[in-house]
Amino acid sequence: MHIYNTLTRKKEELVPIEPNHIRIYACGPTVYNYIHIGNARPICAFDVLRRYLKYRGYQVTYVQNFTDVDDKIIRRANEEGVPASELSERYIREYKTDAHGLNVMDADIHPKVTENMDLIIDMVKKLVESGHAYESNGDVYFRTTSFADYGKLSGQPMEELQAGARIDVNDQKENPLDFAVWKAAKPGEPYWESPWGKGRPGWHIECSAMSTHYLGDTLDLHCGGQDLIFPHHENEIAQSEAATGKAFSHYWMHNGYINIDNKKMSKSLGNFFTVREVAEQYGYEVIRYMMIQAHYRSPINYCKELLDACKASLERLYTCRNTLGRAIAAAPAGDCSEAAKELFAQREQQFITAMDDDLNTADGITALFELARELNRMSADATTPKGQLEAGAKLFDSLTDVLGILYQRKQEDAIPAEVQTLIEERAAARKAKNFAEADRLRDAIAALGYRVKETRQGTQIEKL
């Protein structure tokens, strides 16, 4: 697999440090509110990356943090009159509700800042002792001039960054580019004891300490949104490599922005949408599909027309799989033909080729729809043998699982026993030509939330 490495600004083959084991760190949310649709993009994109690597046979260790102490959390907690810890725990739960709704797998490790404070303080101590950081009135700052490669991720030389930096005459920093790795506590703020007094960590140091602790001094891959390249990821590199003396991450992946009706998403423009709000209207799966139907580095223009198109595309895929399921049930016995085996192998390779090319989910979905068209043709042919349809279904399910879509099928498979009984009674009534009773049972089934109808492939059950 080749990916675009932000660090080198070119596509490179993904070669893990340890054969067949890829260690990934993804920047997680700062938990003070519901996640918005911009947050959902990296969550979905890199969930697909993780799924694809597993599909290709890699062992993947995936770490995603929760920033559960931060200026925004403290401010929101003060507004609501609740402890910051209570607010952050609430929005961790809400994040998980939305992430699970989007069919995002839990990380192998979800470290919280507040539960890793000793690790963070130890890293700050290393930086101070080595001269890479200094204390100033209870704050500790990273000395950017001590790290010769500062700016290498964003591609901005130190001189250009210094020229563009804001100068604050009241600043206690040696250099405008120096950034806080430890902040002295203000009155009423949560704090932890440290060698520099009561305080809490800066944003950037948290990810460095947790990622290197759980994944080792050098990561295979670090990913996140394009907006994090500078300063967050740039600062992570500087402080991590200064602390360990080793390369921090071999590869960096960053997803593109989401615009709203061709405008940048912002609260001030009134075009700021949470995942929860959009899901109430379209459902979570449409949101997930929208996030993966474009290449992860391309911008997405969020609009009603795109959501409607994504909903229609999902319905086509669901229809294909449901039709295929009914065709399997009614198909004559027989094995998959050699021609069909070759066709399925071509479609799988088409999908792999797309995904191996910098996680090109757009072309991967194209391969899936071409497979769906061929499966529709096979399903419509009553002579297609069961083994062939089952082989096609297995491939279809495998590819949709990599993309993390069509997951509603699993939830709909379990038809309640009460509904199943009514379905059987209705079938018996139809066989006895008691159509009045069959209609009554159909209405009873509908009252329980299911639609029953007859097709050429047999009785079809759908959840309303």
Image (spheres, grey):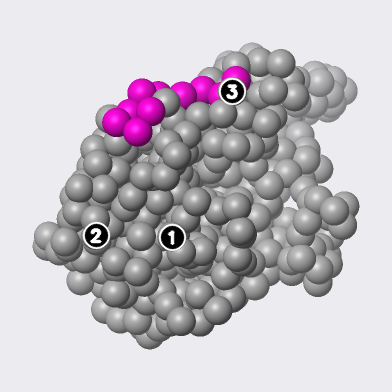
Residue 406, horizontal then vertical, whole percent: 56, 49
Question: In the displayed structure, does residue 9 sit left or right of residue 308?
Answer: left
Q: Out of 206 and 254, give the one closest to the viewer.
A: 206
Quadrant holding the N terminus: bottom left
Q: Residues within 10 Å of mark 1 (few under 14, many from 20)?
A: some
The label on residue 124 is: none
Q: Which residue is mark 2?
A: 242
Residue drawn at (29%, 66%), measured in percent from left and top? Answer: 146
Q: Earlier in the sequence, mark 2 or mark 3?
A: 3
Amino acid type of the residue that numbered disc 3 sits on in the rendered structure: Pro
Viewer-side residue, 67 vs 406: 67
SS of the residue under disc 2: helix
Q: Residue furthest front?
A: 169
Magenta residues span 188-197
Residue 338 visible? The answer is: no
Q: Residues within 10 Å of mark 2 (few under 14, many from 20)?
A: many
Residue 384 in picture, x, y percent from top left: 47, 64
Label 3 vs 1, first from the N-terminus:
1
In whole angstroms, how far apart are the C-alphas of marks 2 and 3? 32 Å
Q: Amino acid at mark 1?
A: Glu
Residue shown at 65% from the left, 72% from the top: 299
- Check the image and name the residue furthest to the left: 19
Residue 187 tag number:
3
- Give SS at disc 1: loop
Pick the front one: 192 or 16: 192
Which of labels 2 and 1 is toward the front? Answer: 1
What residue is rendered at 61% in x and 32% in y? Answer: 73
The secondary element bearing badge 3 is classed as: loop
> Which residue is denoted by mark 1 in the rendering?
174
Sequence-earlier tag: 2 or 1: 1
* Chief secondary structure of the magenta portion: loop
Q: Is residue 345 above or below residue 49?
A: below
